[in-house]
Amino acid sequence: MSATAVTHDLAAVKHGPFDVIRHSWVLAKRSLVKTWRTPEGLIDVTLSPIMFTLLFTFIFGGAIANSPGQYLVFLLPGIIGQNIAFASVGIGIQLNADMEKGIFDRFRALPISRIAPLLGAALGDIVRYVLLFGIMLATGYALGYRITTTPVHVLGALLLIIVFALSLAWAPMLVGLLARSQRAVQGIVFMTLFPLTFASNAFVPTETMPAWLASFAEANPLSHLINAIRALLTETGPWQGPVVATLIWSAVFVVIFAPLAIRTYNRKS
Amino acid sequence: MIPNVSGCTYALPMSSENAVEAHGLVKNFKETKALRGVDFAVPRGTVLGVLGPNGAGKTTAVRILATLLRPDAGHAMVAGFDVAKHPSEVRKRVGLTGQYASIDEELTGRENLIMIGSLLNMTGTNAKARAKELLEWFDLTEAADRMAKTYSGGMRRRLDLAASLTGHPEIVFLDEPTTGLDPAKREDMWDVVRDIVARGTSVLLTTQYLEEADALADDIVVINHGEVIAHDTAENLKRVVGSQTLRVRPSDPADAAAVSVILSEVSAGAAVDQPRKGELAVPVVGDKALTSVVKKLATQKISVTELSLMLPSLDEVFFNLTGERQKPELTPEEELSA
Ligand SMILES: Nc1ncnc2c1ncn2[C@@H]1O[C@H](COP(=O)(O)OP(=O)(O)OP(=O)(O)O)[C@@H](O)[C@H]1O
Ligand SMILES: [Mg+2]
């Protein structure tokens, strides 16, 4: 090891009110670099929703709707909602891996806001949601799905998806911080998500369900998101109601899970 | 009061002259009493060596000082700030190199350092320049653009240390910086520590080797089972535990008694010890002991298979300080049968 003198003295570290944003952005870039290096980590937002779309369209299309084509109009927003929810497990696994590897100790020993690593991980995930949305629209187009609204509506749908996904993400983040292994994170998150995605209006209209299940499915936050996407892409009805309901649910997720996740992160030793 | 081995009063100077002050730190993990009221201080610009065996509480103490853990009782001042009340002020001024590397294995060495620099609010250019400088200093330039998961243990250690020096900290905590390094790499690491100190940085380092504490530290704290059992300068500590240990293994075990007599004549005060079967050891001071022992062995025609002079091991340090042998840690099988 050569002992070269470190000559130029760098200006004293300055701290300001925008630090949280700046630090979150630095950590989001870290996630992006890793995503770029291991694109196979994107399978859950690319190949698997395509597979779900094909399976559901052709297996259930004839039975549920009259034809695969008609069913696709109903199904595609459902698949988007389902996979947005599934994709959120990734962030829990990432945080859990970070804790296990000790890199979190480094972050926690730095003079940065304690929420920056959590926000950074969440922001880095936006790319995944955008990718999922784009892939689904392309897959749909190939199968005959046509958007009937304006590009502004489509953009609105994308923004709503991102807001919802980032809000929901606090729950798997909390699981990621509490669980003792990545396998446990996966198990816990999926065990919760399966009933949540299927007991919704994603695959079949809620009218076909028994009354108790239908009322659950109608209140299900994913159903509101999926209704909003349907309305914004193919004018199935007014979009304002479902959009507001989705935003309220998003706020509820943040209010409940963000403080818990941040507190858990702070207490980790 | 801190047990004191040199006999002279060794009051802890508690003032702003200290980079680090720990007052009665207590930390329990359920039943485990990791720290039972630990006091020590690191005067500004000096190196404190915290010497202790596995499970002594070294890492726990370091993590409390680096604001990663809250003490159950007691308090600590680091760089003039209370770790519990002003953790972010402390974080701005310290660098921590933990016992296990805290680096992102899926980023390259350079990316790791640039990320840390950016998190310390350096501009992009400055963060890159600082990363380059550190990579050169730590001999990582060639591996700089490889993912850290391809690094050897020693390279990870160096990258981790580089990461903790990124922001020019006033105080650096090094938790067992050389455990697991080969002897040459250990010497390199010692040089790095000396470099850091030469720049005016205060250092608290933990170690399991008296040799390392002696090579680097101004003061040494010996801890065991979460308690400070000695706090003194390296010089004074060595005066008691012997600056060196002379070991002799007679070829014929029957000569042990005679060898023991010879050794007690050169002893620095402590009793002759039998660290291993058939081997006798005694702490010695000065440079005459070895020749005098060799002469006496020759006169009495005692042949030996081993004769060595070295710094005492941690085990011998404890024996000389407390008169008790360390209980060896139980192996899993022994624990089961116990
Ligand atoms: N998070 C934890 N949960 C439970 N027990 C812990 C935890 N951290 C440390 N301990 C216990 O506290 C005691 C002190 O541990 P510590 O890691 O501080 O020792 P150490 O001196 O650093 O040891 P080593 O030389 O092996 O690194 C040990 O008995 C250890 O098992
Ligand atoms: Mg340790």
Image: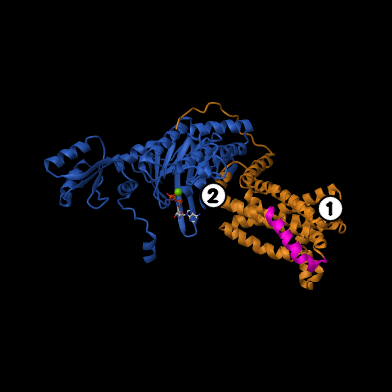
Chain colours: A orange, B blue
Q: From the image, state whether disc 1 or disc 2 is nearer to you.
A: 1
Which kind of residue does numbered mark 1 sit on?
Answer: Ile
The residue indicated by pointer 1 is A147
Residue B142 falls inside the magenta stretch = no
Same chain? Circles 1 and 2? yes
Gap in angstroms between the C-alphas marked 1 and 2: 45 Å
Q: In this view, does B305 lie to the left or right of A251?
A: left
Residue pushed farthest bottom?
A210
Contact between marks 1 and 2 (CB within 8 A): the answer is no
Relative to B298, residue A235 above or below? below
- Given residues B319 and A180, the one toward you in this image is A180
Query: In x, y percent, where is residue B290?
Result: 22, 38
Q: In this view, does B176 lie to the left or right of A165?
A: left
Q: Which residue is drawn at 45% across and 48% down?
A: B58
**Which mark, by number, is residue B252?**
none
Mark 1 — on which chain does it sit? A
Answer yes or no: disc 2 within 8 Å of ligand 1: no
Span highlighted in magenta in the image: A45-66
Q: Main secondary structure of the magenta part?
A: helix
Q: Which quadrant is the N terminus of chain A positioned in?
A: top left
Is residue B24 visible in the rendered structure shown here?
no
- Given residues A125 and B251, the one toward you in this image is A125
Secondary structure category for the residue under label 2 = helix
Query: In x, y percent, where is residue B54?
Result: 41, 51
The residue indicated by pointer 2 is A101
Mark 2 — on which chain does it sit? A
Residue A59 falls inside the magenta stretch = yes
Q: Residue at x 82, y 59 (%)?
A: A73
